[in-house]
Image (cartoon, coloured by chain):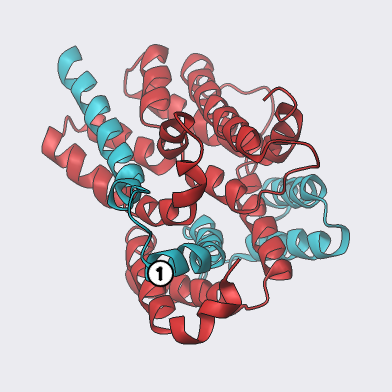
Amino acid sequence: MTFGKALAMVLVAAACTFATRVAPFLLFNGKKPIPPLVRYLGEALPPAVIALLVVYCVKSVDWLAAPHGAPELLCIAVTALLHIWKRSNLLSIGVGTALYMFLVQAVFI
Amino acid sequence: MKKAFRPAFSVTIPVLCGYLFIGLAFGVMLRDIGFAPPWAFFSSLLIYAGSGQYLLVSLLAANASLVTVAAMTLLLNCRHIFYGLSFLETFHQMGRRKWYMIFSLTDETYSLLCSLKTPEGIDPNAMRFWIAILDHSYWIAGSVLGAVIGGMLPFDSTGIDFAMTALFTVIFVEQWMSAKCHVPAFLGLGAAAVSLAILGPDNFILPAMVAICVMLAALRGRLAKEVAG
């Protein structure tokens, strides 16, 4: 592959990624009022999308083979419970991540 | 602007952990197919999309056509269209910084901006801007590091990318506790799980996103008042 072709591939990927991000801002450019349905979706979407992203993070887990996603589910539960209890982002994320690293390196090998 | 740096930095620490290692993995993969560190730097600077750049590595390795690159990238990143909807007004009032905010709206930056709480006396727009810049710089740093040092880390980092899962979990809990209405959260969880079970890990995001939008739109009459911020 030539240098130029590789560069073109990077630039096309960059342009297409930006296109998906800028699309809603071009459609609703602030000059016209935002349609009520779009405004409503903007408010209702975040909790649904964050839930989707949590699922996205465990998408590659093989639920049928041992350990059946146990380290993931356990650490998500620990992170969530710790967060409900202490409400400290760094504590919840730090403990959850450290526990997960321990589990996948030393327990569920 | 300066005052907003510290609070912005502290909320981005989980992304720092996640991005350094996901970026590192990208740098290592790019190096493995024969691309020097500057390629990692410019890819991460200009594209700035995790899964999109992983895809790019396989496309580069296969010497795919530009049309393929365009189609695959658009398809993979379609979900970003929905992210902007939550920040239409917020970004419009950020002047010229708006364009950078739009460019840098990744999954992780989106989730941090959704859950933003600005401390007393800090300009929220300055804090948003710092969050965007910091996340982007972690991503670039991770990928360049990966391309330079390759797979030779001094400790076993297996599993450290769970920081990203934990971050989303924490934000989910935060939103759950502050929301009056949990229907959107349940819809998101349900649609994602069903879509994943039916379509598998590679194709489930976009159908799930569309299903969420359709169901939310259908329930608008009942939910509009409760989700209004």
Report the residue at 49% width, 19% height from top: B144
Disc 1: which residue: A36
Most distant residue in the bottom direction: B222
Task: Indicate the amino acid at tag 1.
Answer: Pro
Give how far across and how far down residue A29 sits, in percent.
Answer: 33, 47
Question: Which chain has been coloured red in this picture?
Answer: B
Can residue A2 be seen by looking at this rendering?
A: no
Can residue B184 be seen by looking at this rendering?
A: yes
- Does residue A81 lie above or below B4 as drawn? below
Q: Classify residue B178 as left or right of residue B198.
A: right
Residue nearest the observer in this picture, B8 or B88? B88
Image-quadrant location for residue B218: bottom left
Report the residue at 60% width, 37% height from top: B125
Residue nearest the observer in this picture, B51 or B174? B174
- Does residue B69 lie above or below A45 as drawn? above
Report the residue at 28% width, 36% height from top: B58
Give how far across and how far down residue B109 sits, in percent.
Answer: 55, 43
How many numbered discs?
Answer: 1
Q: Quadrant of the N terminus of chain A?
A: top left
Give how far across and how far down residue B84 sits, in percent.
Answer: 42, 51
Q: Classify residue A45 as left or right of residue B207.
A: right
Q: Chain of mark 1?
A: A
Secondary structure at numbered mark 1: helix
Most distant residue in the right direction: A86
- Give the colour in which the image draws chain A: cyan
Report the residue at 71% width, 40% height from top: B11
Give how far across and how far down residue B174 sits, in percent.
Answer: 71, 61
